[in-house]
Image (tube, rainbow, N blue to C red):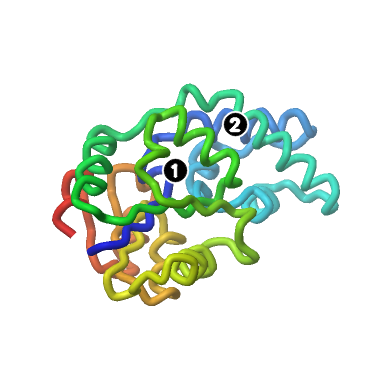
Amino acid sequence: MENYFFDFDGTLADTRQVVVAAVQDSFTQFGLTQPDSVIILGYIGVPPETSFPQMGADLPPEKLATLCQFFRQAYSQHASEIELFAGISEVLGELQAQGKRLFIITSKTNTALQESAELLGILDYFEDVIGCDDVENYKPDPDGIELLVKRYDLEKAASVMIGDAIYDIQMGQAAGVATCGVKWGSQKWAQVQALNPTYQLTDPAEILKL
């Protein structure tokens, strides 16, 4: 493989506690019933504009937009608590040394993603990052991958989408690139496996063998 498209939450970084706290605080502030942590974790990787209504935020569009903005601010305030999964930094450094092209495609906004990646010391490994505000259609639609393929004239046959959630695998399959499910941050591993990704990994070091 030459081109690596990484998901962020649950793939590069463990954001579970921060996401749960930010979602529950946001729902409380807006007088909504807090979703259970298990439910919240099942929606990691999905933009709040899509996931919040499914978690019970039955609000008019304007109020939903305000809720999503509040959530992103709450998440940003706790960004320093996010940690990389063990071995990720070393893997990224080795891939970069080998001349591989690295990208992130996330359901976060581009600004929030860059902020988190910079705090974790990994932003410089990536040639470009794509947030939910950079595309018209979120995961699992292939817009993020298609944007990068076109922008950098990438060969799909030499590209792989790496992620912990079904949305990552579905996006990669829709785009026609290889897919790689990772177990270390997955909340629904059996569902990821059921999609038959090209690769299934249990340790970040295995990324170097793709």
Q: Earlier in the sequence, mark 1 or mark 2?
A: 1
The residue pinned by badge 1 equals 9
Q: How many discs mark residues in the rendered view?
A: 2
* Nearer the observer, 95 or 204: 95
On the image, the x and y values in percent for residue 173 come to: 39, 73
Left or right of 132 in this view: 202: left
The residue drawn where x is 79% and y is 41% is 66
The residue drawn where x is 60% and y is 46% is 109
Real-space Cα distance between discs 1 and 2? 12 Å
Quadrant for residue 169, please give it: bottom left
Quadrant for residue 157, please give it: bottom left
On the image, the x and y values in percent for residue 153 come to: 41, 71
In the rendered structure, which amino acid carries the disc numbered 1? Answer: Asp
Q: Residue furthest left?
A: 209
On the image, the x and y values in percent for residue 98 come to: 19, 51
On the image, the x and y values in percent for residue 21 come to: 57, 28
Quadrant for residue 162, please give it: bottom left
- Which quadrant of the figure contains the N terminus? bottom left
The residue drawn where x is 49% and y is 66% is 151
In the rendered structure, which amino acid carries the disc numbered 2? Answer: Tyr
- Which quadrant of the figure contains the C terminus? bottom left
Left or right of 73 in this view: 119: left
* Nearer the observer, 41 or 89: 89
Residue 124 vs 157, above or below: the answer is: above
* Nearer the observer, 100 or 39: 100
The residue drawn where x is 39% and y is 39% is 124
SS for callout 2:
helix
Residue 75 disc label:
2
